[in-house]
Image (spheres, rainbow, N blue to C red):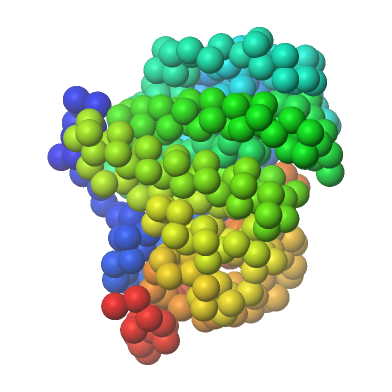
């Protein structure tokens, strides 16, 4: 039995994704998809008819149920806890509303550096976000060892963007303005978020998370210079801090994935940031990724490819797996799945990844010698 948080969990039956993250040989390519628990599933929509979004996030039993829904339906090789990256701004004292057809909205965003005084800089993460940890623990038991459970957090710049913009943005111009006009305050906020994220991820592992993913979803708004000043150093600090923290607490070695959407210009540097896996968005050529990333990779089918007829989807998924090879690889989409997607196309994607990778293993993996 695996020991975490002083409690026994069922033995893990499928560790493909953990082995792939650590660069070990696997029998087939593991696959999961970002936002795999969510609006494209009719069973999730049934839950949403009765409960609002953040009520689901903040109720362990509901978060557990929603996390398990795609695992019951598809042969995914991992579950990811149902939550949201914006629970961290909430924990810091900011109000976040989830408005239908709009998305997250901050009624009182950060406008000037003086607004940083409104944040609870001494937040007790374990207490304030206890519902996340309870959901992870409950879900880890409820999975009965079928697949590993992924925990996650938004990265500092992505969270900063939401906190300043007051919601989603096509330009992130308000947040980027801070980077040019309020450098000291920007770093102060990013350092605070980094501290909280480290504590948050360590507690997720203590609660039962077996992998971690850090979402720098707004990296696409930063060019190389801004990314390497305002994102990369904090991503590095998170990886080092989390790994040190879980080691000190005797929680074992948990692989970490970093997904910096749009940061194709820095994927080589990202691969040296201390993570085990680099997540790739759909704009990155698999062959280029293999040339510049020395560790395991994850991705990266265009989410819109799932709209294609099944024959075309099979062909595109097959091409993706063949390009990446079956070693040091976790299959995924290049971003989260869209809410109007046909669940049966998800099944085609998952089954194709498995069947094609198993066939490639029989023939010999073209990338098998790259990382030995």
Q: Which of 6/122 is in front?
A: 122
Quadrant that contains the N terminus: top left
Could you tell me which residue is drawn at 65 percent across and 38 percent down? Answer: 158
Residue 177 located left or right of residue 26: right
Q: Which of 223/298 is in front?
A: 223
Image quarter for residue 230? top right
- Answer yes or no: is residue 148 visible: no
Quadrant that contains the C terminus: bottom left
Residue 274 located left or right of residue 216: left
Q: In the rendered view, would you say 291 is above or below 297?
A: below
Residue 357 located left or right of residue 141: right
Image quarter for residue 30? bottom left
What percent of the width, then of the height, locates residue 280? Answer: 58, 61
Q: In the rendered view, would you say 288 is above or below 279?
A: below
Could you tell me which residue is drawn at 57 percent across and 39 percent down? Answer: 155
What percent of the width, then of the height, locates residue 121? Answer: 53, 15
Could you tell me which residue is drawn at 32 percent across and 42 percent down? Answer: 243
- Answer yes or no: is residue 308 visible: yes
Q: Which of 236/166 is in front?
A: 236
Could you tell me which residue is drawn at 40 percent across and 17 percent down? Answer: 126
């Amino acid at each position: 039995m695996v020991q975490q948080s002083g409690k026994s969990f069922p033995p893990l039956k499928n560790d493909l994704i953990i082995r792939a993250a650590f660069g070990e040989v696997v029998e087939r390519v593991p696959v999961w998809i970002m936002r795999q628990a969510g609006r494209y599933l009719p069973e999730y929509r049934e839950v949403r008819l009765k409960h609002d979004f953040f009520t689901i996030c903040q109720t362990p039993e509901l978060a557990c149920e929603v996390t398990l829904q795609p695992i019951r339906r598809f042969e995914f090789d991992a579950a990811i806890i149902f939550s949201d990256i914006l629970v961290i701004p909430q924990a810091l004292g900011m109000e976040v509303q989830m408005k239908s057809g709009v998305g997250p909205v901050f009624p009182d965003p950060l406008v000037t550096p003086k607004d940083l005084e409104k944040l609870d800089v001494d937040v007790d993460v374990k207490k304030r976000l206890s519902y996340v940890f309870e959901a992870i623990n409950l879900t880890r038991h409820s999975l009965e060892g079928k697949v590993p459970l992924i925990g996650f957090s938004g990265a500092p710049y992505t969270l900063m963007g939401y906190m300043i913009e007051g919601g989603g943005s096509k330009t992130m111009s308000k947040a980027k303005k801070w980077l040019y006009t309020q450098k000291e305050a920007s770093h102060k906020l990013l350092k605070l978020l980094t501290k909280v994220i480290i504590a948050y991820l360590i507690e997720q592992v203590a609660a039962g998370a077996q992998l971690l993913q850090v979402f720098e979803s707004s990296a696409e708004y930063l060019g190389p210079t801004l990314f390497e000043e305002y994102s990369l150093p904090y991503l590095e600090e998170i990886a080092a801090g989390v790994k040190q923290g879980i080691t000190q607490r005797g929680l074992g070695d948990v692989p970490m994935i970093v997904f910096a959407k749009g940061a194709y210009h820095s994927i080589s540097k990202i691969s040296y940031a201390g993570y085990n896996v680099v997540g790739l968005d759909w704009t990155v050529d698999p062959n280029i990724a293999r040339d510049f990333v020395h560790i395991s990779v994850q991705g990266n089918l265009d989410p819109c490819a799932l709209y294609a007829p099944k024959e075309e989807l099979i062909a595109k998924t097959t091409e993706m797996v063949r390009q990446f090879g079956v070693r040091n690889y976790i299959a995924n989409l290049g971003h989260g799945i869209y809410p109007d997607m046909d669940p049966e196309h998800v099944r085609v994607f998952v089954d194709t990844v498995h069947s094609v990778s198993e066939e490639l293993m029989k023939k010999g993996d073209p990338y098998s010698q790259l990382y030995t």
